Image (cartoon, grey):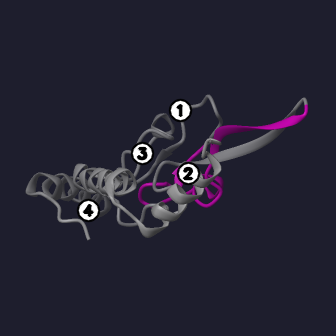
């Protein structure tokens, strides 16, 4: 198990503190879109003999399409359209211009520097084992090689 440095633990705590503070301000945020008002989409398109995945976004079906604020869950003022900034919340400061830009802060995603150091150490041990450790099967392999490469007298 990884032992994290104090610097790493502090960084992870800062990420979690930002998330906790945002959730306190927006306790009823949409859990589908994490308060962003839109969700990622992936479309597959045939391209010659292969298929290409296109990543995009669409309005959230749980909050925006039901005229609910992605931040607080209250009713949105409409009309709402892709180019109209009139969609806004009666209760909080969410507006159409924040769609896709303002939502739940990201979680800390590893590996952190402690985990990277641990992985590097493991990789170095494995490499050293492969390069320097003697194994019984190596004797057999060497013997097979010598038998096949003996030169005639």
| Magenta segment boundaries in residue numbering | 49-78
Q: Mark 4 = which residue?
A: 20
Q: State which quadrant residue 63 falls in.
A: bottom right
Name the residue: 65% across, 56% down: 61
Q: Earlier in the sequence, mark 2 or mark 4?
A: 4
Name the residue: 42% across, 45% down: 94
Q: Dot 4: what SS?
A: helix
Residue 83, percent from left and from top: 62, 28
Residue 66 is left or right of residue 94, and the answer is: right
**Quadrant of the rendering where the N terminus is positioned:** bottom left
Q: Mark 1 = which residue?
A: 85
Q: Which of marks 1 and 3 is nearer the N terminus?
A: 1
Q: Which of marks 1 and 2 is nearer the N terminus?
A: 1
Q: Earlier in the sequence, mark 3 or mark 2?
A: 3
Q: Dot 1: what SS?
A: loop
Q: Do the residues labelled 1 and 4 touch (CB within 8 Å)?
A: no
Q: Which of marks 1 and 4 is in front?
A: 4
């Amino acid at each position: 198990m990884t032992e994290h440095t104090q610097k790493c633990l502090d960084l992870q705590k800062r990420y979690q503190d930002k998330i906790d503070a945002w959730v306190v301000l927006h306790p009823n945020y949409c859990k589908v879109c994490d308060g962003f008002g839109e969700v990622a989409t992936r479309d597959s398109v045939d391209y010659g003999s292969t298929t290409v995945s296109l990543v995009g976004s669409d309005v959230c079906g749980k909050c925006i399409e039901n005229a609910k604020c992605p931040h607080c869950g209250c009713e949105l003022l409409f009309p709402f359209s892709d180019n109209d900034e009139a969609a806004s919340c009666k209760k909080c400061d969410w507006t159409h211009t924040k769609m896709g830009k303002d939502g739940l802060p990201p979680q800390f995603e590893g590996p952190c520097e402690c985990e990277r150091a641990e992985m590097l150490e493991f990789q170095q041990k494995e490499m050293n084992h492969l390069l320097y450790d003697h194994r019984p099967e190596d004797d057999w392999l060497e013997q097979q090689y010598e038998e096949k490469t003996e030169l005639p007298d």
